[in-house]
Image (cartoon, rainbow, N blue to C red):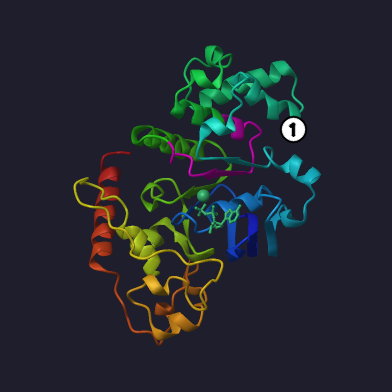
Amino acid sequence: MKKLLEVKDLNISFHTFAGEVQAIRGVNFDLYEGETLAIVGESGSGKSVTTKSIMQLLPPGNSEIKAGEILFNDKDIVKASEKEMQKIRGKDISMIFQDPMTSLNPTMTIGKQIMEPLLKHRKLSKAEAKERALKLLDLVGIPKPEIRIKQYPHQFSGGMRQRVVIAIALACTPKVLIADEPTTALDVTIQGQILDLMKELQKRIETSIIFITHDLGVVANVADRVAVMYGGKIVEIGTVDEIYYNPQHPYTWGLISSMPSLDTTEEELYVIPGTPPDLLNPPKGDAFAPRNPYAMKIDLEEEPPMFKVSDTHYAATWLLHPDAPKVEPPLAVKERMDKFQEKQAGSLNGGK
Ligand SMILES: Nc1ncnc2c1ncn2[C@@H]1O[C@H](COP(=O)(O)OP(=O)(O)O)[C@@H](O)[C@H]1O
Ligand SMILES: [Mg+2]
């Protein structure tokens, strides 16, 4: 598969009154054509900052890309001018955010808002842009597009607004769609519908998707690969199956344990004890060590490299060092893995 985007050794800091917040500390990943890559991690782990940098949408006042490259079409986005970015944003790379209301203009019909990028980037005539807008509304599952196209955002429900936002993002058939927690602000039923739509779109369009979420539970059916972020780094990356069936990093174990259970809602949700690292003073060793019941002495002293588990699976934990004691994932994780496997098997038999 062809690489579309290469993020190499990305380091990003924020300059604040309290000092330098080292938000992103050496992030590396590739995005391939047509794939969906999920980026998962607790709030504050650096998911949004990483992806905003791909769009050059970091706050200009206090953010600084200290090092790294973001290669897109062999061009380094880090070095691109604002003029070059305006040609890329919304055309080659688009982004959708958590809250659909803030991404829409309340004073403009949604038809105009979908047509805007088409008129700007694709130089279509008004009639052509309208035709395409109607098709896009249909694509994202909005009934009666001819009527809806003339309406304003407030006439749409939250879920329908998010569909409109997705239609705008897809208008110019971008190469990359970044979806930053696109379902987090929606209620559970609507969340499911938007996830189904993303899954459906993934099959029907060729766009690669970066899907950001704090909930590992939602990505199993949407993503091809998963990157787990912690404290401004990717600590584990692999295919969905590798992350769910063969997780290696104790932080990934924690995320799996804290997934809402698949068949009961009664039990209390597991929460990983402790708090994320202070990025004003990042720890010397593995940033997860203070929360890691399996931490060894070296975890407090030296940062673990990315150990190779398979050609597609890497994890940054000293537990993978050949000399480390063999540690099995905790029972709760194994139970989740089994349940997950059962559910997958069930949904396959049930003809998905
Ligand atoms: N404008 C900002 N000023 C200072 N620190 C920031 C700013 N934006 C983000 N950060 C810091 O960067 C880190 C990563 O944030 P973010 O990428 O938004 O996390 P996530 O999306 O994973 O929840 C956090 O520690 C956050 O406090
Ligand atoms: Mg975020």
Q: Position of residue 32 (x, y in %)?
A: 58, 53
**What residue span does the magenta drawing correspond to?**
167-185
Pick the residue in front: 219 or 349: 219
Q: Is residue 224 above or below residue 10?
A: above
Tell me what residue is drawn at x 58 percent, y 33 percent.
103
Q: Position of residue 258 (x, y in %)?
A: 31, 56
Q: Is residue 155 above or below residue 168?
A: above
Q: Is residue 71 above or below residue 263?
A: below
Name the residue at the front extreme: 17
Q: Position of residue 275 (x, y in %)?
A: 40, 64
Pick the residue in front: 341 or 67: 67
Q: Amino acid at mark 1?
A: His
Pick the residue in front: 56 or 117: 56
Tell me what residue is drawn at x 64 percent, y 24 percent.
113
The C terminus sits in image quarter:
top left
Name the residue at the top extreme: 147
Image quarter for ligand 1 equals: bottom right
Tell me what residue is drawn at x 69 percent, y 41 percent.
89
Q: Which residue is mark 1?
A: 121
**Splitting the image into 4 quarters, where does residue 190 fall?**
top left
Residue 90 in magenta? no
Residue 183 in magenta? yes
The N terminus sits in image quarter:
bottom right
**Splitting the image into 4 quarters, where does residue 67 fall?**
bottom right
**Splitting the image into 4 quarters, where does residue 2 fall?**
bottom right
Q: Is residue 175 left or right of residue 273?
A: right
